[in-house]
Image: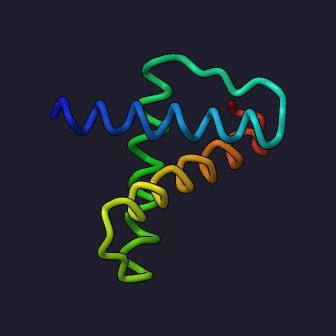
Amino acid sequence: MISVILTGLIVGFLGGFFMNVSFGGSTLIGFIICVVVGLVGSAIGGFLGNSLKVKSRVLQFVLDVVGACILIAVLKFLKIG
């Protein structure tokens, strides 16, 4: 359980960092929201990885971060985050 939360935190942080660097503005989010975004981003990335039949753990991690970026972009578009 701790590893899942830690992975979610890392994925959420990296997603927020890349969105902030790419599009500017403030995507600073709190700890709990960062973990939630990371966990949901990992689920999105897992779906993408399964669809593409990805076997590499590194590529799956990259897809998890991409999933977090997608989630942050959708939240910003909907003016939620």
Quarter of the figure with the N terminus: top left
* Residue drawn at x 49%, y 26% as measured from the top left: 33
Q: Is residue 71 left or right of residue 73?
A: left
Please tell me how many numbered marks the rendered image carries: 0
* Residue drawn at x 48%, y 61% as measured from the top left: 63
Residue furthest to the right in view is 24
Residue furthest to the left in view is 1
Residue 61 x/y as whole percent? 40, 55
| Image coloring type | rainbow
Q: Nearer the viewer, residue 7 or 47?
A: 7
Residue 53 x/y as whole percent? 36, 82
Q: Nearer the viewer, residue 75 or 42?
A: 42
* Residue drawn at x 45%, y 61% as measured from the top left: 45
The part of the image, by quadrant, that contains residue 21 is: top right
Q: Is residue 24 left or right of residue 19?
A: right
Q: Is residue 78 left or right of residue 65?
A: right
* Residue drawn at x 75%, y 39% as measured from the top left: 76
Residue 9 x/y as whole percent? 40, 31
Q: Is residue 43 above or below residue 33?
A: below
Q: Is residue 81 left or right of residue 67?
A: right
Residue furthest to the top in view is 30
